[in-house]
Image (cartoon, helix red, strand yellow):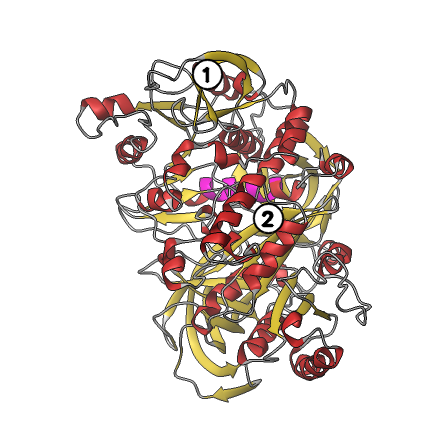
Amino acid sequence: MSKNMSAIHDKIGQFPRELEDESIYIMREVAAQFDRPALLFSGGKDSITLVRLAQKAFFPGKIPFPLVHIDTGHNFPETIEFRDWLAKETGAELIVRYVQDSIDQGKAKEESGKYASRNVLQTVTLLDTIEEFKFDACIGGARRDEEKARAKERIFSVRDDFGQWDAKRQRPELFDMLNGRISVGENVRVFPISNWTELDVWNYIKEEKMEIPSIYFAHQRQVIQRDGMLWADSEHLNKEADEIPFETTVRFRTVGDMTCTAAVSSTAVDIDVIIEEILSAEISERGARIDDKRSEAAMEKRKQQGYF
Amino acid sequence: MDILRIATAGSVDDGKSTLIGRLLYETNSITKDKIEALESASKRKGLNFLDLSLLTDGLIAEREQGITIDVAHIYFSTPTRKYIIADTPGHIEYTRNMVTGASNAKVSLILVDARQGIVEQTARHLSIASLLRIPKVIICVNKMDLVQYQESKFNEIQDKLSELVRKTTFQGQIVSYLPISSLFGQNITKKADEMTWFTGNTLLQELETFEFAETLAQAPARFPVQFVVRPMTEAYHDYRGYAGKISSGTFKVGDEIRVLPTGQTSTIATIEKFENSLDQAIAGESIVMTLSNDIDISRGNSIVLASETNVPSLKDFSAHVCWLDHQALSAGKTYLLQHGIHTTKAKITQITERLDVTQQTSTTEVGQLNLNEIGKISLRTAQAISADIYVENPSNGSFILIDEFSNSTVGVGFVD
């Protein structure tokens, strides 16, 4: 299925402003309805977009909640550097908690084998952090276009004590009315960019001239080839004997841990080219997420257990 | 670029998932890896064509039961518009999801199986589209391939549908009828070569050409105050901005305004969006408003134009409700009523009618309303709410009811 290039150019640079209005409205509802909200920051483009929206929602005031980062220890160094810069730039409070600490405390167990990652483990640290700070609402950057289970997610998604999501017990959301009432022990996950697509996010980053981590753009990197994908080589990746790293030009379309995000071969050095690549892309965004490939229902199962 | 929100509804097996899959496929909204996954899944099922319905059939529970259990949101775009489909299940017991999915929609897309014609669900869907004042309804007579694409069959169904629509529609609602085949892509985004007798639009043309933006900006001006911005920094020492999303109408700098329910008046000094100052803002925009003098305004207050003499303020009123919870609504019970962002207690004084949406009849002297039932109630609120009559200004005329103990959203109401 090849895309007609003129149709591609017609779509470029058109961000539906209504989406921003909707997301800002949601940000303000969070600040008004909850006592201790937090913005879960991953360093990826979606959470960077959230920070921008929060900044706009409360301007000229400061963002009235902290940015919380669950550091797996497997993050790209560029992500961490960017996180610290952004917190400073916006003046927002930054809270960091470490998966390594959960492992050291025996609450989480490191996976083994060549597909070992800390993606599942971060749920443990996240739930502990929510409890430590008594957060009653956690803002996340999930979008409904990413994946089938997320397509059914509400904007205010109530979780029980264990962070669990139950598809059958969701509250109906009518018009733009958001009901954030919860009982003791419950908390809410909030998804202000639910209705954005990947293309919307990129067009927004472009129109707003936002800074993003350098790994989204083409760069030279040591990678290995595995399962038809390019994996970033690092000390955290368990390589087999025949997996020999080589250097090539890549970029990341989605940014998670080094052990669960694949790179794509690309020479895109600016946003316009990235947007063109997305519009003519042959692989869906989450197709580069190794964690989703574990099984067809992988995301839904992880959500039931408290993942985003 | 604007956004058109569509609600889809149908009965079990009328091919709704295939229709949505077809729309995505033909607007190039599916990536190659997903198409490959679809090809292999279709092959596993022993099919020699792409089963596009697999694109939207999501959750584990659904696959077990072979049904759709909740509202799913699906996105696609053309160079003209971004589209958001709220796909809602066709089961009778899931009417609550249909109302939920349709609450933001400007278009209701209803499917009818060409072999079966009108079924009970068709009437239900049409009634709900009208209850929610959805301005446009597109009825797709699907599976035309199974009736040999006969014009006479389509005409016969259309005649019966028009008869039904006459009972449910309201003035200004646009209803169109299209013969389609989702399975073979007839009349979805391309003209049907199998039905040259049909000279109307394709489904996509209907969606691309529907205009809806103007009405909201011209409705009465309503601005619910969501959040008071008080930076208290040196640069903004006395700054007090009222943040919110305009629910209807237009506000301009210099407009005389009145705050509800307090009745205080002032003048709009600035309208701001982040670092930009605007001359005016319209329905749907999230803004910060500052006023020329310091008055006491808090979250839940509503700002309207001072020139308006008939300001909305309701304490004792009647409304239509759709009940969304397993525990029935009973007269005499107290709930929390949320109108926009304002919440107050409300007592249901009476349930006056229960509507049978499939027969267009009603019953009086009703003790309670059960899950998925629609009825008419009288209620009294602790504080006045600044709501309009729903049919006059839908974006300021609805509310939800919340159970005080479970915190669940248990009902949705439309002010009469």
Q: Nearer the viewer, residue B126 or B41?
A: B41
Above or below: residue A78 compared with residue B96: above
Give, as a three-letter code, the residue at label 2: Tyr
* Residue sitting at x 48%, y 58%: B46
Give, as a three-letter code, the residue at label 1: Val
- Residue B172 drawn in magenta: no
- Single out the residue that lies furthest toward the left: A106
Q: Nearer the viewer, residue B208 or B30?
A: B30
Above or below: residue B358 compared with residue B390: below
- Name the quarter where the N terminus of chain B is drawn: top right
- Report the magenta residues as a range: A20-31
* Residue sitting at x 41%, y 57%: A171
Q: Nearer the viewer, residue B169 or B192?
A: B192
Cα separation between marks 2 and 1: 34 Å
Question: Is label 1 in a helix, a strand or a loop?
Answer: strand
Circle 2 residue? B75
Residue B35 visible from this viewpoint: yes
Q: Position of residue A132 (x, y in %)?
A: 26, 32
Main SS, magenta region, reads: helix
Q: Position of residue B285 (x, y in %)?
A: 65, 44
Circle 1 residue? A223
**In the shown orientation, is residue B186 left or right of residue B356?**
right
Q: Position of residue B260 (x, y in %)?
A: 58, 55
